Amino acid sequence: MRKTIEKLITEQSYLYFIENHPAIIMILDSDSGNIIQVNKAAELFYGFSKEEFAQINISDINTYTKAEIRLEMDLAKSQERNYFKFKHRIKSGKVRDVEVISFPITIETGEYLFSFINPNESFSMENERQSFNYNPLFHPEELHLSLGQLYSRFLPS
C-alpha cells in the first residue's frame, strides 16, 4: 500500500511539473505526428485548447512539408539530432519561429517524441543553455522509465 501511494504521489508530481512548467511541452506520436499531449504553456502560445490539439497533427502547425517533417522526426527518433529550428503556425494564422529540443521516449503504448518548444521572440535556447550551465552529457533516455510510467497513465491505450 505504501509503495502504491508513493508511486501515485511521484506520478502526480511529474504531471503537475509538466502541466505547469513554463516551457512549451508537446508529446507527439513518433510514427504519425499526431499531437498526443501538451501543457498549459503550449495552449497559451499556440491558442489551441487541449481538445483541439488532440485533433491536430504536427504537420498542421509546422510549415515544412510532410516529407520534411517526417525526415526531422526520424532524426529525433533515432537521436541523430535533437535540436531543430522551425516555423510554426499558431491558431490566429500567424507564423512564429521556434526552436525545438525533441527526444524519443518509449512507453507501454508506443514510441513518442517529447519536445520542448521555445519561441524565438523571447529568448534563445542556446543562451539559456549557457546561462544555466546546460549539461551536454545529459541523456534523455535516463528519463525513459519515469516518463514512461508517468505517461502510461494518460496516453491512449
Image: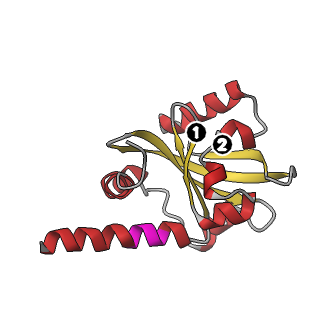
Residue 141 in the image: x percent, y percent? 38, 49
On-image quarter of the N terminus: bottom left
63 shown above or below 66: below
Give the residue at the far left of this rendering.
1
Look at label 2 and name its amino acid: Ile
39 shown above or below 73: below
Left or right for 54, reference 94: left
Query: Which residue corresponds to mark 2?
Result: 56
The quadrant in which residue 44 appears is bottom right
On-image quarter of the C terminus: top left
Mark 2 Cα shell of 10 Å, populated few (<14), some (14-19), many (≥20):
some
Residue 42 in the image: x percent, y percent? 65, 60
In this picture, which residue range is highlighted in magenta? 13-17
Residue 87 in the image: x percent, y percent? 78, 46
Residue 133 in view in this figure:
no
Query: Which residue corresponds to mark 1?
Result: 34
Look at label 1 and name its amino acid: Asn
29 shown above or below 54: above
